[in-house]
Image (cartoon, grey):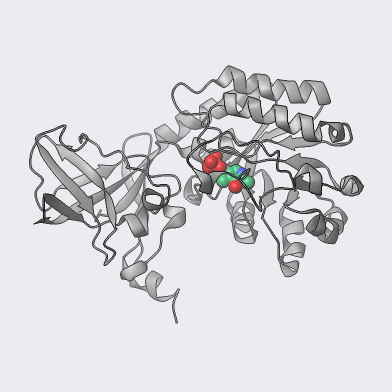
Amino acid sequence: MNTSYYLIDEAALRRNLEILRGVRERTGCKILLAQKAFSMFAVYPIIAEYLDGATASGLFEARLAAEELQGENHVFSAAYRAEDIPELARLCDHVVFNSCAQLRAYAPQVLAAGKQAGLRINPECSTQEGHAIYDPCGEKSRLGVTRAQFDPEVLPLLSGLHFHTLCEQDSDALETTLDAVEARFGEFFPGLRWLNFGGGHHITRPGYDIPRLERCIDRIQQRYGLQVYLEPGEAVALNAGILRCTVLDIVENGGKIAILDTSAACHMPDVLEMPYRPPLRGSGLPGEKAYSYRLGGPTCLAGDIIGDYSFDRPLAVGDVLEFGDMAIYSMVKNNTFNGMPLPSIALRTLDGTERCIRSFGYEDFKQRLS
Ligand SMILES: *Cc1c(COP(=O)(O)O)cnc(C)c1O
């Protein structure tokens, strides 16, 4: 297989899914795949063995789940287009709205189709520091209805409430958030059927406090008789895939710089957006091992830098490198800036065979332009 490509590891994916299924089985909560993190539909049949369904960020993801993943189909968008509502009402079991105005305008169509409408709330409880772009409870957030903006007159349209305020967090942050959710919106729970805890639960990360998560779920399900939903994205495919790439050239400018056939800007945009330094197999921090390199992509962007790494032996042109944790928020965010080829998508099955599932070419670049 030519690099670059994402290689998803079925065994690692199943390990995550088993952890999630354990939570479902012990608590009776329902767990959905948040497709925006990971939409590799070739493995949706595997995911469907363990989870209750999927959630979408809009019509296209909802359609993908309807076509490829057995189970419940949910959608949340910060705003819907009127023309998409009939199809969403047909495809989705839950349509979650982001304002009382959109709920009033469109919920009747959802209910007429025999489906349920929900509303995303903003519990105004920030539990993360430093990642303002991932904090939906920050100042002037457009995500979720605050208690001040919530109009109890919409309650007859509602089957449930939804919050999504966490990002890569442990269950202590969920517990704190639930206190705020209950304090602000708990009075409305008795008339509802479900409460959706959103995503951002890093459940499959080693050390995550699963018993505390289960206590949070039990608390809501037992106290109010609500069905709890979780919709993790990251946790489903955390550490379940790598990005394999090749060293194309090595240049020198105040240090050695290796240019790879993959790009931070095109193939791992979270490296620049979040930002973070992805793990690289066999490497150390700069200076930790004998030979240090800055690794970058072949695009024109000066900032197309993946990070600084060190190795036990010098890198050479043609060496293959493996970046870790590349299943999530990677292929779903790819772009072809600079005419960069999209990495292929491959699967390592349980018997260890590596199989290319999809490769992309010039036509995939051209067909998005005109
Ligand atoms: C992003 C998102 C998720 C998934 O978040 P992860 O951090 O990947 O677990 C779930 N629900 C909503 C509404 C989201 O925006």
**Residue 36 seen anywhere in this rendered image of the structure:** yes
Q: Nearer the viewer, residue 204 or 92?
A: 204
Q: Does 309 appear above or below 370?
A: above
Q: Nearer the viewer, residue 262 or 289?
A: 289
Quarter containing ligand 1? top right
Q: Seen in the image, is 200 located left or right of residue 357? A: right
Q: Seen in the image, is 91 located left or right of residue 309? A: right
Coordinates of residue 279 in the picture (x, y in percent):
30, 38
Q: Which residue is rendered at x = 74% and y = 70% of the image?
A: 83
Q: Which residue is rendered at x = 52% and y = 26% of the image?
A: 19
Coordinates of residue 44 in the picture (x, y in percent):
53, 45
Coordinates of residue 331 in the picture (x, y in percent):
42, 53
Q: Nearer the viewer, residue 293 or 146?
A: 146
Q: Seen in the image, is 324 located left or right of residue 35? A: left
Which image quadrant: the C terminus?
Answer: bottom left
Q: Seen in the image, is 175 located left or right of residue 307? A: right
Coordinates of residue 249 in the picture (x, y in percent):
12, 57
**Residue 34 seen anywhere in this rendered image of the structure:** no
Residue at the outermost front position: 139
Q: Quadrant of residue 340?
A: bottom left
